[in-house]
Image (cartoon, rainbow, N blue to C red):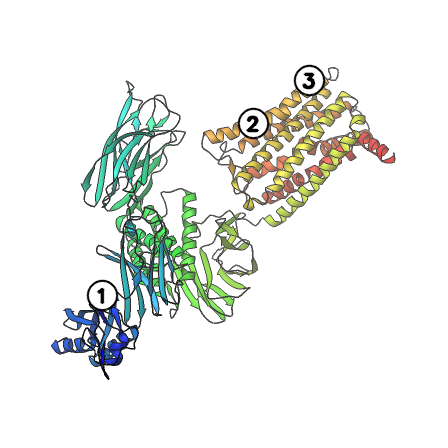
Amino acid sequence: CLIVGDKSTCNCSEGYIWSNEVCYNYSCCRETTCTQNVSHITPLCVAKVKVHINGIVILSASTWDYTKTIQLVTAFEGLNGFKYLNVTGQRQGNSIADFEAAVSVKFATSKLQDIVTYLEKGLPAVLLVDTVGMVTIEPLDNTVSYLSSPQMKCTFEEAMDSSGWNMSRKYERFELNKGTVVVLDRNCSTKEYKSCVAITLQNVTGIWAGTYECGFTSGSVRHTAKTQLNVALLPDVIDLKINPLTADCSIMPIPKSVDISITATILASTESFEVSWSYMGELKSKLDNTSDGDYLVYSFSASISCQETINKQYVNVIFKNTKEQVKSAQVDIPVLYEGAKFCGEESNNGEFWPKTPAGDTVINRTCTEGRTGFKSRTCEVNTAWQLVYSYCVNKELNKVLNAADNFLKGLGATQAVAMDIFEGLKNSSTLNSDSSDTMADIMASINILGVMAIASNTIVLQEDVFPNFITAASSMLNKTWDGVNQSTVQYLSSNYLQSVEGLVKNIKVNNSNGMNSQNLELKFCSSCDCNVSVFDIGVNLNKTTGIMKTIAVKNLMNKLRNSFRKTVPTSLLVSATLEDNSDSSLKIMLDFPTGQLNPTKPFCVFWNIKKMDWSDAGCIVKTSDSNHTLCECNHLTSFSVLMAKHDISTEVLDIITNVGLGVSICSLLIFLIIESLVWSAVVKTNLSHFRHTALVNIAMFLLLADCSFLASTSHETLSDTWCLVLTICKHLFFLAMFSWMLCMSVMLVHQLIFVFSPLRKRVFMFLSSIVGYVCPILIVGSSYVYSKYTNKPYHDPKICWLVYEKLLEGSIHAFLLPVGTIILTNLFSMVVVIITLLKSSVPDSSKADDKETAKSILKVVVFLTPVFGVTWVFGFALLLLKEDDPMFTFANYTFTILNSFQGLLLLLTGFFAEQKVREELLKLIMV
């Protein structure tokens, strides 16, 4: 500044320009000489910067012309450091104009907003403006590693209304939101930088390479900054195909090796990969690629050895990027060795399945046109082919699935993208596909619902998605869920229910009253006292705040797993959830139409997601008749009513069983204690030693069996491993108990028939040990090994007991056949004893003698029935009787009572009925 008297002349040095305070308060702008007295202002000049402004003008009524361009330029010339403004294009009948401008100094957002407001009123129009050069962005390294977690941060001096990130790549632009990969941090501001937004990308892959733009918005103004993220790429998916599908080493003459052609296909990439392959871990050679449209294909031939190995033979394809990171894919080669069991080659619906070793799975990665995925088929150990498992998904549906995965990660996680995803799902679900591919599309569709349900926990979805979502979900239930096993159907149906319930709960509701489709009906209630009806199911809930969302579902109950007692599902299911509610306790009433001509006992249940089964915890039946069942529950989730298969009171039987087992366990413990106290006094003869040895073993194994049975009564809470252990224990202990009963009955018959040829103690103990200990172990062990070898279930995890399939099939026959044989033998022994008593009576005896004989026979029946296990005859009667037979109920209760209290009966017959034991115990007590 040159100051002469009261006159001042100031200039900025080259590369500098007047500060905003000088420009706007003293009208000294751009690079002109300032003749105002500004020498006291700090800063007087500021360094030049490049700030670019991009904007769009949307005229309200008129069209764009030269006068409006002049008006636009004149307004922006009011910015300090103004350089130029150009109108770059006009659209939609000249009603929209794009422009760009540049200034050489940063400005306050309010200054630019004033210019925008002035123009919006003067044109009139709507203006949207972006700037580049106002925001500071932290630079990234040149290239980040695959699966690394890079961080980027943008800061701005002013406090703005909102902030966010976008990512763009060729022909695509995505808004970034919180997800499994994207982590946003808007709480990084400081005193200097009042606006801040940081982003962390967790475990980046190739899809995250691109240009990243942060932005701070206030009013019509958005300040932005950009940076490039380069990722040292590795293939996200490596698709390996082999031809032929198996290596056949069984042909004659036996070859030393079989050549298998292998192709590895990846999406085309800008990365220069170093690719090689290995066989059984041994590196072979490097590979070159050929281009196939959007893909790169690596082809080679591998010689698979025909020398039999313990482990499976495999081939690896290895990709290495510029940062020396490695990713590989492995394919197992099924090898059919000489003499090995195999499934014969088959042609099924135009698909060829080659000879395959038993226990191996063949994967065919060739799908029909318009589909992508694979088909597989397993050869069971018994050389029988399983059904073909198809996961050849419609390509358009697969694109929707990929979009949903990206949405969950946070890439393009917006309401508009969510609308597109559900619209694509609806369009695909309403198409008619080939029956063999229907299940693959259903699985992919349920997967999409699940992904979007998880994403809705962190990303807000609005009610606009409901129509397409409900239509798509309903259409899935119209299709036949076949071509997969029952456990897969149960797993998919549980995921379907959980996903639908999660989405309904998380999607925000503003004005919608609900919607209806063929299989789903959805209604909302925002009042305190909610009474709604969905598919004729009445739902009542009293709440203080929030919105109750109720959805009823048809055609799903028969697909869900049901091991809840002996019940059958009804046709309807209803789910109730709350949005924005904090009530600590709730009570919901549900009025289900029965829908059955002959209704049995109802159970109010809810779907337990963790156990993937029904439970009645927190739910009770208030009233029930032939038309309705009223349920009351103290929690919210998915509810239904299950009907008992029969009118048998399982609750009464459960009580009898538990009480009887408790009494029996106590009785058996008392019996064993008494036997230990009087043992030396009551086993002075061989016969008494035989008898008491058998009784102690019978009591011991019955005690162990009862304890195992009691431990398995709550099978819903047991893991599958514990269920298997308890099944083996019950099988073993009950067989051992019956085996010692057999020893006792055979010993008794021998003593009656061969009076003058008594058994020696050593012989009895040797034979009894084999029958009582070794035989049960062999039977249980062989039945378990047989079940594993034939790939059939040994136990039923629903009841923790052996499996019955049909007559002479199922592991239950390893129990029924030996036990049935023993019971028949013991019945024969009882008959022999009774006949012997009858023969011992005099033919011309008096009536008094007849009475004594009858008493003796009655004693034999009463005393030997529990010891010989004859009460189990009623169990066999249950297998023969039909469940609707009136005698079935009688046999069921009789069997339950007699066998639950078998330990008590054993105590009564083994202690109170034997005089010698009573006398010895009294002596001990008196002493």
Q: Earlier in the sequence, mark 2 or mark 3?
A: 3
How busy is the neighbourhood of tag 1: few (under 14 within 10 Å), some, or many (20 plus)? some
Q: Which residue is mark 2?
A: 779
Q: Which residue is mark 3?
A: 763
Q: Amino acid at mark 1?
A: Lys
**Residue 474 can be seen in this image:** no
Q: Residue at x 69, y 33 (%)?
A: 699
How busy is the neighbourhood of tag 2: few (under 14 within 10 Å), some, or many (20 plus)? some
* Frontmost residue, 208 versus 612: 208
Circle 3 — which element? Answer: helix
For residue 466, side relative to residue 106 (left or right): right
Say which quadrant the C terminus sits in: top right
Q: Position of residue 279 (x, y in %)?
A: 31, 29
Up/down of 723 relative to 419, above or below: above
Q: How many marks?
A: 3
Q: Position of residue 315 (x, y in %)?
A: 31, 32
* Label 2, label 1: how far apart the Cα atoms are: 89 Å
Label annotation for residue 548: none
Q: Amino acid at mark 2?
A: Ile
* Frontmost residue, 326 versus 572: 326
How busy is the neighbourhood of tag 3: few (under 14 within 10 Å), some, or many (20 plus)? few
Q: Which residue is mark 1?
A: 50
Up/down of 860 relative to 11, above or below: above
